[in-house]
Amino acid sequence: MRLRSPSMSELHAFAAAARLGSFTRAAAELCVTQGAVSRAIARLESHFGQPLIQRNAHRLSLTEAGKRLLDAVAGPLDAIENASAALLAGDRRHQLTLSAVPTLASVWLVPRLPEFHRRHPEIRLDFVPYRRDEDFSGPTPDAALLAGEADAWPGLQVDYVIGRDMVPICHPDRARARHEAGRWTRPEELLGEPLLYHTTAPANWQHWLQAAGVPSAAPRLTTGFDQVSILLQAVKADMGVAVLQRCLVRDDIASGRVAAPFDLPIRLQRGYFLCAPKERQGHPALEVFRAWLLEAAARDGGVELPEILASN
């Protein structure tokens, strides 16, 4: 049978231009150039041998033939789009696209992912580049592990995962020398040391000291780093003392690569949170990952420590 219908791209261009009254707005909606929309409609008019859209300086208008065509194709085009979206969503039921703070991903999350894949082999995880100011304005990710406080992402589904438990760390030789000299018996004595810090969370030192019983502390910070991994290397190079998330340094403390002079059960407001747009609720892969992630964090032990929240 000889097909008399035009191409879908031409019909989409026509319907978008008719609905929006502008080739420019239609092009933006369809993610093509204005010229592409104009050419698609010209091919459509050539196919039917009559004008479908009248062009003027201010707004497009439909001819009688254009109105009949729009009435006939608008519903079917919407139905095709809805069916396509449903099929694509079905294909993604077991796919999840994530982004994560790099240090948390490499130190804490990735070593635990083999367990996730053993328990849920049907789920495919894809990681995309991390954006510190992720606002989910693009097509990816479905969810992100972000650093901050719980109220930093209004309008999103937010679950605390881990990272509120903070501990000061230093080079083992520095801790040994201070203890042999009879020092570092009280947390406020750390104020005399070079205090290293993360540039996105410089208040962590003040919050930790306040929670440790030094309410009037005014720490003089020395050197800042924008990545936890570099900050940790600075500690190992004995540049000073840093306060970091326990989950990121637990292995270094256990192995003796760094020392924790005051290992107190202190929790701050800032931590790592699983964030996702509320419209992603019910995404099967996200729900499975979320449940496993919170279980893994609970097993890590940090969430069970007494909660001593520092004031902001």
Image: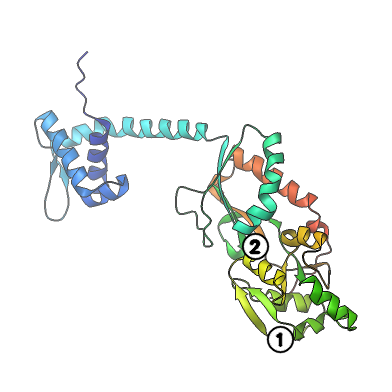
Q: Which residue is mark 2?
A: 150
* Quarter of the view holding residue 14: top left
In this rendering, the count of numbered labels is: 2
Per the model, the C-alpha gap separating discs 1 and 2 is 25 Å
| Left or right: where 53 falls relative to 231 | left
**Residue 311 makes an appearance in the image:** no
**Disc 1 crowd, CA 10 A, few/some/many (<14, 14-19, 20+):** few
Compared to residue 298, the image places residue 236 above or below, namely below
Residue 275, given in percent of the width and then of the height, sits at 60, 54
Front in this rendered view, residue 224 or 16: 224
Q: Where, quadrant-wise, is the C terminus in this rendering?
A: bottom right
Q: Which residue is mark 1?
A: 218
Residue 271, given in percent of the width and then of the height, sits at 68, 63
Under circle 2, the secondary element is: helix
Compared to residue 141, the image places residue 229 above or below, namely below
The three-letter code of the residue at mark 1 reads: Ala
Under circle 1, the secondary element is: loop
* Residue drawn at x 74%, y 59% as measured from the top left: 247
Q: Where, quadrant-wise, is the N terminus in this rendering?
A: top left
Seen from this angle, which residue lies furthest top?
1
Residue 3, given in percent of the width and then of the height, sits at 21, 19
Compared to residue 115, the image places residue 240 above or below, namely below
Which marked residue is nearer to the observer: mark 1 or mark 2?
1
